[in-house]
Amino acid sequence: MSYDVLERNQPQGLGLPGFRCAWDARRGAKQLYDLFKRIEMTKEVFEYRTFTRLKQLEYLIRTQQIDPQFFWTNEVGRNDLLAENLE
């Protein structure tokens, strides 16, 4: 993956002049792999809904804590979510 497209396609005076990305996708993926291996992150933990935004949104809609427009449905839903994420 190359970020040269950011340089080529930025309008005059916009973007990130002089920016050079020090990492590529492969290096970033390796960093995550090494970290997850070091902390012994399991597949089950990695795929748990709190780490996946779409799964969490589906859960919140299914449990009626948010509506289909992603607004909280009541104060109870907000408090339940906070308590659950602290566990």
Image: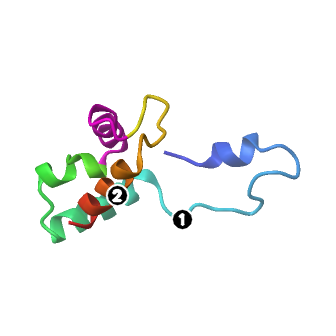
Dot 2 lies on which element? helix
Q: Which residue is mark 1?
A: 22
| Rendered residue at 27%/37% (across/down) | 63
| Rendered residue at 29%/55% (across/down) | 80
Locate the C terminus by quadrant: bottom left
| Rendered residue at 26%/67% (across/down) | 86
Q: Nearer the viewer, residue 82 or 49?
A: 82
Count numbered badges in the picture: 2
Q: Nearer the viewer, residue 57 or 1?
A: 57
- Residue range corresponding to the magenta coloring: 52-65
**Residue 63 is inside the magenta segment:** yes
Residue 21 on image: x %, y %: 58, 60
Toward the bottom, the furthest residue is 38
Q: CA distance from mark 1 to mark 2?
A: 41 Å
Residue 25 on image: x %, y %: 43, 52
Residue 16 on image: x %, y %: 74, 58
Q: Residues within 10 Å of mark 1 (few under 14, many from 20)?
A: few
Task: Judge from the rendering whether residue 2 lies leftward or rightward of residue 59; answer left or right.
Answer: right
Q: Residues within 10 Å of mark 2 (few under 14, many from 20)?
A: few
Dot 1 lies on which element? loop
Residue 85 on image: x %, y %: 28, 61
Which quadrant would residue 42 be assigned to in this image? bottom left
Q: Which residue is mark 2?
A: 79
Disc 2 residue type?
Asn
Q: Are the residues tagged 1 and 2 within 8 Å (C-beta)? A: no
Main SS, magenta region, reads helix
| Rendered residue at 36%/39% (across/down) | 57
Task: Judge from the rendering whether residue 1 lies leftward or rightward of residue 56; answer left or right.
Answer: right
Residue 39's mark? none
